[in-house]
Amino acid sequence: MQKINTTTPVSTKLKRGEAATVSPALWEEDRVEALRSYYILDTPPEEAFNNLVRLAAYICGTPISLVSLIDSKRQWIKARTGPLDIIDAPRDVSFCQHAMMAEDVLEIRDPHLNPLYKDYPAVANDPGVRFYAGAPLTTPDGMPLGTICTIDTEPRTLTEQQRDALRILAKEVMSHLELRRARQQLELEQQKMDGLLRMANDNAQSMFVSSRHEIFVKQDHKLVRVHTDDIRYVEALGDYVNIYTSRERYTVYSTMKELEAKLPVREFARIHRKYIVCLDRITAIEGDAVQIDTGRSQDRSPIPALIPIGNSYKAVLLSRLNLI
């Protein structure tokens, strides 16, 4: 049985380029952070990992096989096969916490005779483990995440071919973890890009709406271009609205809300539930009404119109005027 020191990290398990003097606590923080960067903990079963544990059990001739990940305080099972119905367990009573630190496949024979393992629940109770072999799952940076392991209730010894198969399966597990993370990162980047595009489109639409200077209204089966700088005010009339310009009145089937969205927001204001006015055409405010310059008569004198101001709109209207 391979023996390792489980109190300090083995130097080859440090991140590449780090000194071997990194404290165990800081090293463990980095290791757990590396594990959690895969966003694999507490995820549903996945066929790719299930197939690998089935293959490991078949090759090694054991009834139980696991993909086991070691979190800060627990062992979490991503995939399992055989009569071991657990999802997680305390880390301090798991074989995998030792196996992930090993340089190679770690075999533990007759754990009930070993003082380190004999009181583990899986050894002292059901299923009564009598053999364990685990290959470490190691990131490209050298951080151990857990193991792919095989377990038996009878003593046994792996052949060199079986040990080599476990090494290969461990690499396959890490390949799936890397591919899974890369796919998630791509999906996240796509979501961010989609969000940026939506934001850009919304901003462009908002700028377009706020800067448009013409609308088309349907009159007698044709579309008539109306320049917004020629609109004096808009009046609601049931299911229709009247659009008053300096020369014409256009009646269209629409709502005040729809029309308000089509007018430049800097130039028009809703002053009543039934009226929208052009701010530049306000000539005076008399009590609860505004006087609008609607154009000029034949003798070129102004033609004013008094438009009522709704109580709930007055404060907003006054805030948009340059008062002295």
Image (spheres, helix red, strand yellow):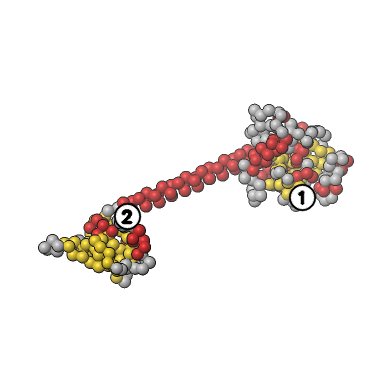
Residue 174 picture location, percent across and down: 65, 38
For residue 215, side relative to residue 81 (left or right):
left
**Residue appearing at x 82%, y 48% in the figure:** 121
Q: Position of residue 137 (x, y in %)?
A: 69, 38
Mark positioned earlier in the residue sequence (1 or 2) = 1
Which residue of the protein is positioned furthest toward the left in this rendering?
299
Task: Judge the density around disc 2: few (<14), some (14-19), many (≥20) Cα neighbours within 10 Å.
Answer: few
Q: Residue furthest bottom?
A: 238
Circle 1 sits on which residue?
A: 84
Identify residue for label 2: 266
Tell me: residue 4, above or below residue 268: above
Q: Nearer the viewer, residue 16 or 279?
A: 279
Q: Is 89 situated left or right of 234 in this image?
A: right
Which residue type does callout 1 highlight?
Leu
Three-letter amino acid code at the position of disc 2: Arg
Residue 8 in the image: state x and y as whole percent. 76, 34
Q: Secondary structure at mark 2?
A: loop
